[in-house]
Image (tube, rainbow, N blue to C red):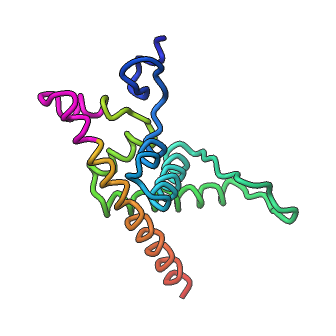
Amino acid sequence: MERVGKDDYQGPVGKRSRCNHLLTLRKAGELDAEAETLAERWLSDYQFGVHGYTDAMHSPLPSDYIRGDAITFATSRGIASERVGLVRDNLGDDAHDMLVRLLSLDQSFASIAREKFPARSKTSAEKAIRERAVVLLQILPSAYKSACRLQKQRKEQARR
């Protein structure tokens, strides 16, 4: 019971469940598949860059796979961190903070609303946070793609 009282659980009455904003917004029709996919990629980059882990194993490794070493791990982690930083530079620190709260910390809209808008009514504050989240997640794909393009350009320039 103690766990469901935490900020990353949602639901006013009855069964309370862990927050999954991407699924919730997708089911409501407020988020398209591209936005959901790129938000998951951003989250994977963020977790790998900040914490040093990621759930990137979607299929078995090919038979000719060569395992990397500490240098390839650090390089890959740096590339992921740079991509997160480029998105942060593009969207701003407040948007980055909101992405971390929504996707990495899984904070509920209510929890974020209590912190950001303490003077507003609960319903109004939650609605404002939800609207901000939707707008942010809709512009995230263009920022993420832009970061990927910039990294590719820098890589090509470095090879010259």
**67 within the magenta span:** no
Q: Looking at the magenta stretch, what is its main secondary structure?
A: helix
- In the rendered view, tell whether residue 159 sits above or below residue 13: below
Q: Residue at the spot x=43%, y=41% of the render?
A: 21
Badge count = 0
Q: Residue at the spot x=43%, y=64% of the render?
A: 144
Q: Magenta residues?
A: 112-129
Residue at far right of view: 63
The image quadrant where one finds the C terminus is: bottom right
Residue 158: % across, % down: 51, 81
Residue 58: % across, % down: 70, 53
- In the rendered view, tell whether residue 157 sits above or below residue 149: below
Q: Residue at the spot x=56%, y=83% of the render?
A: 159
For residue 59, side relative to residue 52 (left or right) = right
**128 within the magenta span:** yes
- In the rendered view, tell whether residue 126 sits above or below residue 28: above
Residue 132: % across, % down: 27, 48
Residue at far top of view: 1
For residue 116, side relative to residue 111 (left or right) = left
